[in-house]
Amino acid sequence: MLNHLVFYTIRMSTEYYLSLTSMQTTQRNNNISNMVNGKENRNVFKSKSSLFTPNLAYLPPRDEIEACEQRLTLLNISGEQNNRENDAAPIISSHNDKVHPLLDAVDRLRHLKIMQEGIQLPTIVVVGDQSYGKSSVLESLAGISLPREFNGKIIPTDESHMADAIVMATNEIAGKGKGILNNPLTLIVKKKGVPDLTMVDLPGITRVPVHGQPEDIYEQISKIIKEFITPEESKILNVLSASVDFTTCESIRMSQQVDKIGERTLVVVTKADKSPEGLLEKVIADDVNIGLGYVCVSNRIGDESYEQARAEENKFFESHHLLSKISKSMVGIPILAQKLVQIQATIIVKCLPDIVQKINDKISSNMEDLNKLPQIMTSISEAMTTFMNILGLAKESLRKILLRGEFDEYPDEMEMHCTARFADMLNQYSSELQSKSVENYSNGNFLLEEIRVLEETKAIGLPNFLPRAVFLTLLQKKMKTISFAPFEFVEKTWNYLEKVLISVLMRHSDNYPQLLSSTRRAAHNLVAKKEKQSVDWVSDLVEMGKLTDYTCNPEYALLNDHSKPSKVQIDELGEIEVGQLRSHVGVVQEAFDMKIRMTTYWSIVLRRWVDSMALNLLFSIQKLVNKEMEFDGLEKMLEESPNVAEKRKRLENSIKLLMGSKDVVANIIDKITTNVN
Ligand SMILES: Nc1nc2c(ncn2[C@@H]2O[C@H](COP(=O)(O)OP(=O)(O)OP(=O)(O)O)[C@@H](O)[C@H]2O)c(=O)[nH]1
């Protein structure tokens, strides 16, 4: 029992070959059939009628699909020519010489898999609700029997070779997987007297899952149908049954969604023989808005031959009291064939210029992408040149943003406007130092610390002689309150610098993914080294500040300069509660003197910490950018990263495919132009 639905691309032509093939497509866009019609694939099947409904295939695991692809190439079973079929009366008598080259060109494009490139081909897509007679219509047009499933089992008939082959192919594609395989089976019917047509036969629309089909079978089928009927390049052959109200057909609802005014839709009404009542009225009323018109047909019933079926059909429409009233231009398989051939030729001619344009656009954009890819490097010297070039460019970018404040390369990325960000960070650091140093005297502790230290350092000696140890003790205590700040600042700025450095380096080595991780590591190590140097320097700065006191700053000097005004404004002290000092009369003067000196000196210390930090930072960055940025990555440059290699291959293949397609289209356009002239 077959549990799957496949859809076919059926190419019918006036030669007498019939071959079957199926190819796995890997990309979503590549889901329209692949056509194999090269001479080497033209194998002949003896086709006998059989019963089996084409169903949607379940998706097998990927490796199974690949293996299956290979097996399927062997599935073009060779055999003797089916001369009996050859003798059949032609469905369409006019010679297809004009259509044939056009169709060949489109088939060649299909075979080249141009749809993979997102370029749609003009296609006639056959849709219909389940059991409305889609397969029967295609059989009638092709004059062959398609396999179908009948009440869950295959009934072999005498044309079983072809049907078996299709069944085998379907099984091969479908495997035992559970998902729906959006992968067409291509059937090429080359037979005398059949119309030259390429059609995509989609699975019949069903709402109720049967034979273990997935619960969401309707959604899956609708999705595939939608994909095929949506492109403007597709014409929709909507198969309706004469026995139903057209307005209730699911396939009509779907085609109306993508083709509202019906300009791309043609209806074929089957089973006219079975339900002739009201058919004329229905097609005349055109309740479902069909722009390309209706053709009513009667397909082969049971075991009759195709010739008998055509004769029967003819008789019905000639003599039946109801059917004979329908215009002869709207009845019979030959009329349907004629209409389809005409529609097909029209859409191909209409679409060709667009296809040429799309091919050209795609080639240019692929070429552009290919040129953007890094060159493949074959020697150390080539790698060296490229590497030095990357480094040179990165250094120049860094000089611009870190040293010169030019951010034309990063106009909108504030984080990369480094000089401004450094200034922000330094201002913040400075304010933090200031705010951490503010002493609060509101609880009456003004001068108490100074007095306490003075009292503890008193010794036998000359009065009013301020010992230096007192000053240093107080200084050290004050230093402790802010000594973490420069370390935090150093950490913050180097973290920021690391981000900037890596971002610039990554940008310049973007095309060389093989360099990215080692470059990132090297940048991190370099920054870690520089940060350590800065931390050592900051430790010294802090220690120096604690152990020594010196300034030649004039602000401090003016404390001892009697020629300067005797009043100074000490903002830092603010409003002070002094009541408690009255009990320390002896040392207050000394303590106050100490306080004034410390406050003045302290503001100099803070300024020094900010200024020297700024200088150190800028100096470190200069050294880093100009002298220390040396990375090791040469050998890695010689290996092309798998991603780039894959992208290169994809682009090259795509360009090759498009160039081939361009030739095909150019040839056919040449032919058309020559014929017109
Ligand atoms: N009397 C009569 N029976 C027809 C005609 N067309 C199709 N049938 C019968 O209707 C049934 C369904 O036809 P199919 O061609 O299998 O229908 P289908 O739309 O391909 O079916 P799915 O692909 O399963 O959706 C078969 O038993 C056919 O013999 C017709 O014009 N007249």
Image (tube, rainbow, N blue to C red):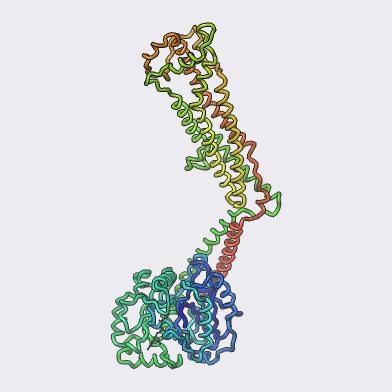
- In front here: 426 or 224? 426
370 relative to 676, above or below: above
Q: Is residue 254 visible?
A: yes
Residue 173 horizontal side relative to residue 265, left or right: right
Q: Quadrant of residue 17?
A: bottom right
Residue 297, horizontal then vertical, whole percent = 38, 86
What residue appears at the point 50 percent right and 78 percent down from the top-left corner? 99
Q: Report the label total.
A: 0
236 relative to 514, above or below: below
Residue 252, horizontal then vertical, whole percent = 35, 75
Residue 584, horizontal then vertical, whole percent = 42, 11
Residue 88, horizontal then vertical, whole percent = 49, 91
Q: Quadrant of ligand 1?
A: bottom left
What residue appears at the point 47 percent right and 43 percent down from the top-left corner? 412
Q: Is residue 673 visible?
A: no
Residue 493 horizontal side relative to residue 333, left or right: right
- In front here: 423 or 234? 423
Q: Quadrant of residue 667?
A: bottom right
What residue appears at the point 50 percent right and 23 percent down from the top-left corner? 477
367 relative to 592, above or below: below
- In front here: 610 or 540? 540
